[in-house]
Amino acid sequence: MHFLIYKIQKNVKEQGMSYDPEVECQKVVCRIKELCKSKKLSFKAVAKKAELAQSTLSEIVNGNTHPQIYSLFKICNALEIPIQLLFSESKLDDSVCIGEK
């Protein structure tokens, strides 16, 4: 297992890949907003279904805090989607993401 992780890290470095955590978090938040809109679910409904405090989800979608992986799993369960969809490279709906910090 450690060899596999090393090999992946080596490939990432060789390809010059790196992540900007701020940008990546913004993309995830935008994807959450987009999915809520497409499923016609309010943030309040998603928070309730995810068993998250409404204030927690509000802080996440308003860009006031970074989402924790545990919360992302709960949000994915509420939206009935695989977590990979939050990290998809497909085009985001810019109209949903206006106002991102």
Image (cartoon, rainbow, N blue to C red):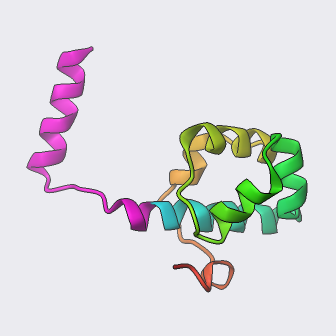
- Give the main secondary structure of the magenta stretch: helix
17 magenta-colored = yes
**x, y (%) of residue 10?**
12, 37
- Looking at the image, is 18 positioned above or below residue 93? above
Is 81 in the magenta? no
Whether residue 92 sits left or right of residue 59 in the image: it is left
The residue positioned 77% from the left and 59% from the top of the image is 55
Q: Residue visible at 90% across and 55% down?
A: 45
Q: Report the residue that reaches farthest toward the top.
A: 1
| Extent of the magenta region | 1-24
Q: Position of residue 3 (x, y in %)?
A: 17, 18
Q: Is residue 88 left or right of residue 15?
A: right
The x, y position of residue 97, in whole percent, is: 62, 78
In front here: 72 or 92? Answer: 72
Q: Is residue 70 above or below residue 14?
A: above
Give coordinates of residue 26: x percent, y percent: 51, 67
Q: In this rendered view, identify the residue nearer to me: 64 or 97.
A: 64
So how many labels did they put on this image?
0
Which residue lies at the image location 24% right of the left edge and 26% below the top edge?
5
Among the 4 quarters of the image, the one containing residue 19: bottom left
**Identity of the residue drawn at 80% across and 49% down:** 53
The image quadrant where one finds the N terminus is top left
